[in-house]
Amino acid sequence: MPKRTDLKSILIIGAGPIVIGQACEFDYSGTQACKALKEEGYRVILINSNPATIMTDPEFADVTYIEPLTLEIVEKIIAAERPSALLPTLGGQTALNLSMELHKAGILEKYGVEMIGAKPEAITKGEDREIFKQCMIKIGLDVAKSRTVKSMPEARAAAEFLGAFPLIIRPSFTLGGSGGGIAYNREEFEHICANGLDLSPVHEVLVEECLLGWKEYEMEVMRDNKDQCVVICSIENFDPMGVHTGDSITVAPAMTLSDKEFQTMRDASFAVIREIGVETGGSNIQFSIDPDTGRQVVIEMNPRVSRSSALASKATGFPIAKIAAKLAIGYTLDELRNDITRLTPASFEPTIDYVVTKIPRFTFEKFPDADATLTSAMKSVGEAMAIGRTFKESMQKCMRSLETGARGFGGGGKHGHDEPVEEKIINAKLGTPNAERVYFIRHAFKAGYSVDRVFDITKIDRWFLTQLHQIFEMEQALAKHTLATVDTAALRRAKEFGFSDVQLAHILKSDLATVRADRKQRGVHTTYRLVDTCAAEFEAFTPYYYSSYGDENEVMAPSGKKKIMILGGGPNRIGQGIEFDYCCVHASFALREMGYESVMVNSNPETVSTDYDTSDRLYFEPLTLEDVLEIYQQEKCDGVIVQFGGQTPLNLATALKKNGVNVIGTSPESIELAEDRKQFSAILDKTGLKSPANRTAMNEADALKAAHEIGFPVLLRPSFVLGGRGMFIVYSEDEFKNVVRQAFDVMPDKPVLIDKFLEDAIELDVDCICDGEISVIGGMLEHIEFAGVHSGDAAMVMPPHTLPAAMLATVRQATHELARELKVIGLMNVQFAIKDHELYVLEVNPRASRTVPFVAKAIGVPLAKLAAKVMTGSKLKDLGFTKEQTPKHWCVKEAVFPFVRFPGSTIALGPEMRSTGEVMGIDADLGVAFAKAQAAAKPGLPVKGNVFLSVKDGDKVRAVEIARRLEGFGFALYSTSGTADTLAAAGVKVKKLAKIQEGRPNAVDLIKNGQIQMVINTPAGMIPRRDENAIRSAAYAHNVCIMTTITGAQAAVQGIDALKHKHVGVRPIQAYKGNVNLVG
Amino acid sequence: MSTSKPAVLALEDGSIFRGLAFGADATIAGECVFNTSMTGYQEILTDPSYFGQIVTMTAVQIGNYGICPADTEAAGPKASGFVVRELSPIVSNWRSQLPLDAYLRQHGIPGISEIDTRALTKKLRVDGAMKCCLSTLPLSDAEAVQRAQAWQDMAGADYVKDVTCRTPYLWRADDPANYNSPYLPVGTTMNAPAVPTKKFRVAAFDYGAKHSIYRKLVNHGFEVQVFPATATGEQVREHQPDAVFLSNGPGDPAALPYIHQTVTNLIPDYPIFGICLGHQMLTHALGGSTFKLKFGHRGGNQPVKNLETGKVSITAQNHGFATDPKSLEKTGAKVTEINLNDHTVEGLRHTKLPIFSVQYHPEAAPGPNDADPLFVDFYRMVEARKAGTL
């Protein structure tokens, strides 16, 4: 059937900010959907609060709303735009839930908006666990035995019915299974159920028979309106049941299913998608198999494009999101083309002649108080994917893609050491799923454990364990040799097993450069193979490659154009995420516009950059020196861009240059210079700028000495890191001694920096672009919080809202001078602090920063694209960007945090970044813009109700003013002794609550009972008191608005004022174009 | 698991692939083909249609789930040799009773692993299916190439006689000799439709039939009397069947005139359903012709469009020859299904008589079950014929 002509415009809801369980993959899917629908001639209306996405670039949709994803706002947009249809399945759980809210509130019906792709009935059937189970039983599929409960007594009865622990508890309608868990005993059961009931928006949990240790599978299925179904990819989890699939190592295709079992699962998948009634598009269906009896159980389905769909798309070359969008508007699979083979249709099932491994990336180091055990609630923040001809090759490539310091399965590096590990530790690390478990399998083998013994402890399938054992045996065999004595056949086989040159250097007692040279001399060369959807059955036209060691190299003939390589950011982590992928994608677009061939290298399957049509050539490869050099030489690139992918490529810059790579843009020397205290001080001296007093130390004793010289408080931080890893504000020697080791451990062998900490200073982020002749400021963002909060976590306002014009002029001049002195070609980010009318330079980063996409959205100028063009030699003058533009409207950036995923972790803003994503609020009024940012970051500012207020001594004066205004808005105030007394003394009416350990009811009780609508709680000192943290945890867990800085609270008051007294309208970013003042 | 013993695969064009030996110690020659199924090596090896062929799996990790007697399509492997990228050192599946290596050794079939199967596949795609020699014994490259070149091409050769049964017999699903049993995990029923109580007698020609086909026929309400390929029309008529079935099988469909004649003889009198070689036999019997494809269709992901309903099924396929659609023009048959990848004929139906056939494998094994309803169609056709409405 051809596309529908009765639809004119289609609304797509994005996934909002990056959170655990919902990362860049929905930018990838949303971007594909926008492109797919636009090329069919529909008017595409997009709403997403996340400015760091490619999809919210003005050219991807006809109208783009960067507005909060709330019922009220979306209704306003629907009223304004009157879309004919809503496509709810491409923006993750957020879009699906919001679409259901719109449906239930009657808004879709009111405005005559049709839901396409999946109907509300299907979504309900797929999402409601009890209805879903009944559906499965109806079609003859097996499910885990379970009971849905809405109260603790019901939960206890369910446990009785199911008989034995362990039991799984899954709250309904929470993202990535948050709030769920496995209870091994009655006590845990009580605890997890209570928490789950709390967190579920419908106060419902499922208590379920535990399938711990069973094999776990996923099927990515598509269906069209002719009821034609195909399986795009099967995925087998390396980690057996018990670990959330997002936290599991997964492998495609399924490895241990016979055809009979596979076909049963395939048939079951189709039966599921038909019964649930997903009319068109993709679904992900999870199965579990009892390894001893073959009993096959349906776990769940996602009636939408999911994280696994993104993985399946990258793993097979089949663009699930794009095809899903086309199916939703009426096409059938056979009417669509397979882009890769061109001649064959999309109605087929990809077959792959390689193995794909995905390993999740965790950041437990940022939440040291949280439980690092992997459970049914997702905790990872990103993932790496690798493709190899065999499982062994793909597994080792994936391990090094993760950039955790692990080089692979052994061969030195993190977790890969040769020293024996105690059995006690091995057993503990194997017995409970955790981020490092896979590495301890090697330690177990080294300690003489058999595959069977490891299986008994882990229940990881023996097939996987045997493969790892083969890698281990290879390492053992090689270790008997040196590079000189090892024979070439063994060397080649080691490369086929996925060993990197770094690993081989360690094992063969040599060094990277020598191994590399020797290997090449012996003719052991990397070859590149195509991801072609069809196992070479048809010719492929899309240059999408992975490396391997085979007989044949499939790199396509050069086009004659000059080639520039772009290094991506690798797996998402806190501090390095979608913002950098955004920049890389822009670089690619810019290069193509300039007539270059763009060569993308990245290992993150969630991204737009790893879409096969983003760049001219795509290499899905680890971002290590070896892998990058091989591609560079293979493709005979003319240059490489390192400044867009975050810290990952920057860390390679110097080594690449040493190996003859042409790093374009700002030189690696300048990049290093900005990190080198001594050289940088010289530049500051030269330009007459100053920085807070600072020292560099190579050891703990020197660091302490330096701290004393400068005087507390000091800021302690490692060099060469992104995201403030290991960064501390320290007020005393005792505190200093507690944390100094951690600062050194982050980057061993690199110095630690000690700066004077400027208290209550205003911080400013400035992004600029420089072509070697002139520099132009892209944007200046004033932090809402005082200095000391990592810029990734700080709320920011653009243009600056409190700084006087004279100071901004000084900032501009300083920025231009720094750009000139650092010989920046491309982007530069400077962090300034202003204290007592003095300007300090905190940090200069001659690279793309996290704020680049935000600034680009604020002023409507594609900064990253311009920067890429500048790096290839264009001049800003010729590109038409010579003057700073400041928006006439207000743009507020707010961060979102994953605290709810890490119960027990310290909740406070500080110099170490811990947010996973960001949102943007735009409005003509600053208060409204701030309120929008808060609403987008969830839960949003309240306009009535009760506020709990408890602040540190230094904030008390400001707190009185805040309390007065809240009182004036009609809020009732609650507080504990200290703050309460201050407020009462100032004449503010306040109800005094007991401190947590002093009695009940306390603030936590009130929060749990829904009696508190906002918490203002500013922590004293770096380590917050336990009771304070309990209040903040409760606020996060119960979706209560919380402000942990006094300036944040002041802004909130302004926002509430705006919400109560001003109109909150919506306006697409296209309508903001040109709404700027030119500076100078 | 693979030994450290070398093995060689030589192609007629002189290409040499050196790898490691598994399975039996032997030197064999045959036609080198590739299969893109990601699961189902056991069903592939035991499919008699692969007789005379050396099969390469494009999927890389082979042998992971071992061999399960219930999944075989014939009493033993029928392919001449087996080529894989990597052979699993262990078996991990609760149904397995034997490792692949031991199974092949038991049946005298040699295998080679650790070769670049993608490079081999690309060669076959570009240059077409080739004669080859696979040896797990000491053999020089030159000799291996010579053995490949010396192999008697399958064009014009009757392979069916080597794989058909010797005498007619009643196929019993519960006979332990007839391996292959249906599989459904415990606890899963998938609401399988009930087997019709009224049974029809079908005379099934065994050109090298897969057991799954017989099982499917039985499950869809047929009593299956198997006849050797050489059985005459009279022998079939004596059995008084309600319908005739033509099975899959190996080799060149044009080289089997005796079968063409038998089928021609039966066409006017019986509802007929043909699969794979059976479809090609029907083509010839109706007066049409077949031709050799460059490298064939072998895999479990082939899209087939039904021209009558417009629907696409994902099908299992294994064939090196195809029906020439032009040749059907005056035969009374029309093309009902085509392959969407290359638009070759995948199904035909007689416009007047109750006769239809498909090039692909609705019995799956290995591969998708999407085309299972064809067996229902066959039953209904026979039912209608018996009721006199057809």
Image (cartoon, coloured by chain):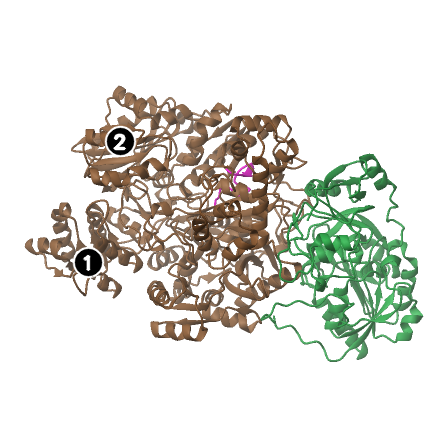
Chain colours: A brown, B green
Instruction: Name the side, left or right, on which A64 lies relative to A958.
Output: right
Alpha-carbon span between mark 2 and mark 1: 46 Å
Say which label, 2 or 1, has the lower sequence index: 2
Q: Residue A808's quadrant in the figure?
A: top left
Question: Is residue A133 depicted above or below A559 in this figure?
Answer: below
Q: Which mark is residue A528?
A: none
Q: Residue furthest top?
A: A686
Question: Is residue B70 depicted above or below A513 in this figure?
Answer: below
Q: Most prominent secondary structure in the magenta stretch?
A: loop
Pointer 1: what residue?
A947
Instruction: Name the side, left or right, on which A707 lies relative to A119.
Output: left
Circle 2: is it few (<14), some (14-19), or many (20+) Cα within 10 Å? few
Between B370 and A813, the one nearer to me in the picture: B370
Q: Residue A547's quadrant in the figure?
A: top right
From the image, which quarter does the N terminus of chain A lie in? bottom right
Q: Position of residue A488 (x, y in %)?
A: 64, 31
Q: Position of residue A911 (x, y in %)?
A: 28, 40
Q: Secondary structure at mark 2?
A: helix
Quick check: can you spot residue A1079?
yes
Between B140 and A275, the one nearer to me in the picture: B140
Looking at the rendering, the stretch of residues picked out in magenta corresponds to: A607-622
Amino acid at the residue labelled 1: Val
From the image, which quarter does the C terminus of chain A lie in? top left
Pointer 2: what residue?
A701
Instruction: Name the side, left or right, on which A505 lies relative to B62.
Output: left
Disc count in the image? 2
**Pointer 2 chain:** A
Q: Residue at x 43, y 32 (%)?
A: A651
